[in-house]
Image (cartoon, rainbow, N blue to C red):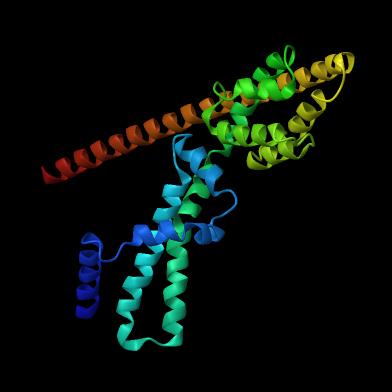
Amino acid sequence: MEIVIIGVIAFFIFEYNKKINTNRFIKDNLSHLRILKEDDYDFLVKAKYGESADPEILFSSRIKGALIGVVVLFLMFLGNLTFINVVLIFVVAYFVFKSQYNSLKSYYKRHLHQINLQLPFFLKMMEILAQHYTIPVALSRTVNTAPEIFRPGLREMIEKINAGDSSIEPYMEFAKQYPVSDSVRMMRLLYRLGLGGQEVKHEQLIMFSRNVSALQNKAREQRYRDRLKKMENKTMVMLAVTGGGVMILLLLSVVSMMGI
């Protein structure tokens, strides 16, 4: 244990004095280290922290944490560096590396309910803009006013469309990033809305509007149920506190009477 403490102190001293520069090492090798980055990492970072977050900085910190973990564990097992211990070192480093990504993934899954409630109102904005603009232009105009959690997916979709991808794939990728009820069907309708002529577009817009209205009604009902459930929970807590208080008062009265 003394070796570990001395080694860790020495490592941080060298790091502080720039004799060892992990940040420089990571920066120089970032192009190679990017193969470890998950495909949806950038999206998840921006979904949680907003558009101002820099995924590269957070990814570098993940690499740094894993490297420090390797060094600390290597020092711990320095006197008994067997094959099993070497495997254990890299397994633990892998879990350290993956921990932030798993946290982002968990955060995103927890917020799928919120996304489900916000999607119909975003689609309503699209319905209004689609009456006057083409779908790619309407999408571009919604970026700054859309709910923040949709903005990373919207920017990615718009980039693909502007790059010349006229297929349904950019729309399906958006639906996969926000896998809530009816997202795939609504993205298909949105794609078809941008294909037809003016007469066909009018009919498709009516169909799109009906579907959006149905989703909005579902979202309103769900919000009402959520509020009702929240009120019921508060009522149950109040009843439990009141009942507990009454029981405590009765017990104190009984104890007081027995004492007399």
Q: Give the residue displayed 75% in from the left and 40% down from the top.
A: 169
Which residue is the extreme one toward the left?
260
Question: Residue 11: x percent and y percent?
Answer: 25, 69
Question: Residue 89: x percent and y percent?
Answer: 42, 75
Quarter-wise, where is residue 35 in the image?
bottom right
Q: Give the residue displayed 22% in from the left and 80% down from the top.
A: 3
How many marks can you see? Answer: 0
Q: Is residue 107 above or below residue 100?
A: above
Quarter occupied by the N terminus: bottom left
Q: In this view, does 88 lie above or below 44?
A: below
Q: In this view, does 242 lie above or below 25?
A: above
Quarter-wise, where is residue 193 in the image?
top right
Residue 72 seen in render: yes
Quarter occupied by the C terminus: top left
In the figure, is residue 88 to the left or right of 20?
A: right
Q: Give the residue displayed 42% in from the left and 54% down from the top.
A: 60
Quarter-wise, where is residue 83 in the image?
bottom left
Front one among 151 and 140: 140
Front one among 107 and 164: 164
In the figure, is residue 231 to the left or right of 124?
A: left
Residue 217 seen in render: no
Question: Residue 197: x percent and y percent?
Answer: 87, 18
In the figure, is residue 187 to the left or right of 141?
A: right
Q: Give the residue displayed 63% in from the left and 38% down from the top.
A: 178
